[in-house]
Image (tube, helix red, strand yellow):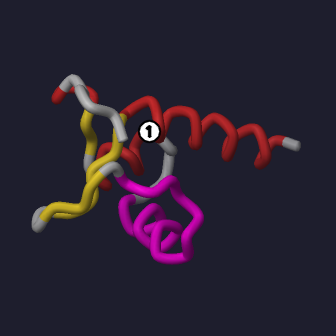
Amino acid sequence: MNALVDPQELIGSSEAAKLAEMTTHAFKVARHRGQTPEPLVTLTCGPIWIRSQIEEWAAIRHAKRLS
């Protein structure tokens, strides 16, 4: 786990879905199916990821869809 993370780099499900060009619902379904990266932490308000983690995953997902 990262010891220090810039708070501005932390994102929730809605932001993650937007980065992945998915609806929030589709992203949550993919998460439930184990198809998304594990969140850094899950708070009462929901899961939290590091932006770069989702950007990398979304780029790989996009490349797979194009091939």
Q: Position of residue 51 (x, y in %)?
A: 37, 33
- Is residue 11 shown above or below 13? above
Residue 48 in magenta stretch? no
Question: Helix, strand or loop at disc 1?
Answer: helix
Kindly identify the residue that appears in the image at 36 percent across and 41 percent down: 1
Specify the amino acid type for callout 1. Leu
Horizontal side of 4 relative to 20 (left or right) equals left
Of residues 19 and 12, the one drawn nearer to the viewer in this rendering: 12
Q: Position of residue 34 (x, y in %)?
A: 55, 70
Horizontal side of 45 relative to 23 (left or right) equals left
Q: Position of residue 33 (x, y in %)?
A: 55, 76
Query: Picture quarter containing residue 2?
Result: top left
Crowding at dot 1, Cα within 10 Å, few <14 / some 14-19 / many 20+, comes out as some
Q: Which residues are magenta?
A: 24-39
- Is residue 10 shown above or below 12? above
Kindly identify the residue that appears in the image at 16 percent across and 61 percent down: 43
**Which residue corresponds to mark 1?**
19
Kindly identify the residue that appears in the image at 47 percent across and 67 percent down: 31
Q: Position of residue 25 (x, y in %)?
A: 39, 68
Residue 36 in magenta stretch? yes
In which quadrant will I find the C terminus? top right
- Is residue 19 shown above or below 12? above
Query: Picture quarter containing residue 50?
Result: top left
